[in-house]
Amino acid sequence: MGTSKFDIADYLDSKEMIAEYLNSVLEEGDNDDVIVAIGHVAKAIGMTKIAEETGMSRPSLYKAFSDGAKPQFSTVMKVLKAVGGQIRVNPIST
């Protein structure tokens, strides 16, 4: 019996799961982790749909959210909006 490659996008099947995943990465990950996580969410929803909503091409999206990519902040915000997310700032408890 063979094994298949794990793809987190296969498990991001609800808005709640997507929000939990992104929040977890935002809390625990670094910049690169956040970019890759947004790419996973976009893949889970569908790159074609995200491309249509952002006005970007699918290849540009894949490139912008690949490991090691440095997308512009405006690109990150467009994709977050397209996936139904937003960035919020909460005070840190001391």
Image (cartoon, helix red, strand yellow):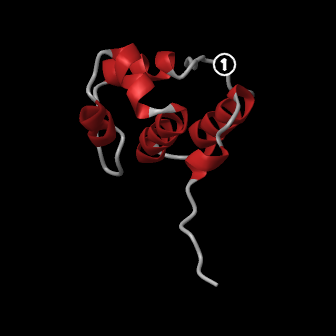
Picture coordinates of residue 93, whole percent (x, y): 74, 27
Q: Name the residue under label 1.
A: 90
Q: Report the residue at 41% width, 46% height from top.
A: 32
Quarter holding the N terminus?
bottom right
Q: What residue type is labelled 1?
A: Asn
Q: How many residues crowd mark 1 within 10 Å: few (<14), some (14–19), many (20+)?
A: few
Quadrant in the picture for residue 64: top left
| Between 14 and 20, the one nearer to me in the picture | 14
Q: Report the residue at 40% width, 15% height from top.
A: 53
- 24 displayed left or right of 50: right
Picture coordinates of residue 92, whole percent (x, y): 68, 26
Is residue 39 depicted above or below 79 in this figure? below
Quarter holding the C terminus?
top right
Quadrant in the picture for residue 79: top left
| Between 83 and 20, the one nearer to me in the picture | 83
Q: Report the residue at 28% width, 26% height from top.
A: 72
| Between 60 and 1, the one nearer to me in the picture | 1
Picture coordinates of residue 7, whole percent (x, y): 55, 56
